[in-house]
Amino acid sequence: MIASLTSAPVGDVLDRLYTDAERSHAAFRGERRQQAGGPGGPGGRPAHRGGDEREFFARAKNLYMAVSRQTGTLLYLLARTHRARAVVEFGTSFGVSTLCLAAAVKDNGGGLVIGTEFEPGKVAATRRAAEEAGLGDIVEVREGDALKTLARDLPATVDLLFLDGAKSMYLDVLGLLEGRLGPGAVVVADNASRGAGYLDHVRSSPAYLSSAVDGDVEVSIRTGGAEERSAAG
């Protein structure tokens, strides 16, 4: 079985990205300590969970919001075993999860990973990383608001959806894509408990079978087709 995830050039690029991620987190923590001037977070501002997400992402534009190696491997395994050819990702950051998903799609015989990212610098960096990893023909990264970039020009059927952007938008993005998720489609949400209402939705809806995996990663399988979705909605 071919495993592009751990072989060159993908494995080498991922190793570099994980190293860069560790450095960026160390630098970000240092900046937060320097700015701390009051209760709740940097400079007296509210901490991320209770504050404005756009403000946080603006301050963290150089921060690698990368999935862990374990989650990256999980994404590869899910996409590989599901034989995913059409993948959509909300929140690419610097492209770690994008490469993990694209490696699986390549090993499945080809297809497309469509990512979306609000920060232009991260979009450009992910595109470069995909080219360096030999996955440029599989990866398409769209820049801007996901509710706009993912509202057009998508495959009729999406095999796997990965949610890892602004947590407050998880339900909105899922709702936007639900009509393209056929029976057996996989939905993965990182930091799922922080997505307001997200866990309640996927765990209570008859259209999903869902469970926590690897800490706060939620993996859900779409169990019904269009008729069941209509009845459930």
Image (cartoon, grey):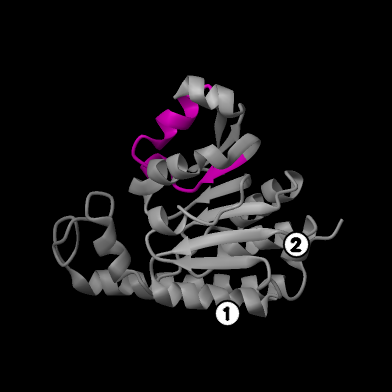
Per the rendering, the mark at residue 149 is none
Who's the residue at 56% across and 47% down the image? Answer: 161
SS for dot 2: helix
Q: In this rendered view, identify the residue nearer to me: 174 or 216.
A: 174
Q: Tag 1: residue type?
A: Arg
User: Are there few (<14), some (14-19), or many (20+) residues within 10 Å of tag 1?
Assistant: some
Residue 209, how many percent across, how many down? 58, 28
Q: In this rendered view, identify the residue nearer to me: 189 or 150.
A: 150
The residue identified by callout 1 is 128
Who's the residue at 53% across and 61% down the image? Answer: 115
Left or right of 10 in this view: 174: left
Residue 162, how many percent across, how many down? 54, 50
Please report the bounds of the magenta region as a residue range.
186-206
The residue identified by callout 2 is 106
Who's the residue at 20% across and 72% down the image? Answer: 35
User: Are there few (<14), some (14-19), or many (20+) residues within 10 Å of tag 2?
Assistant: many
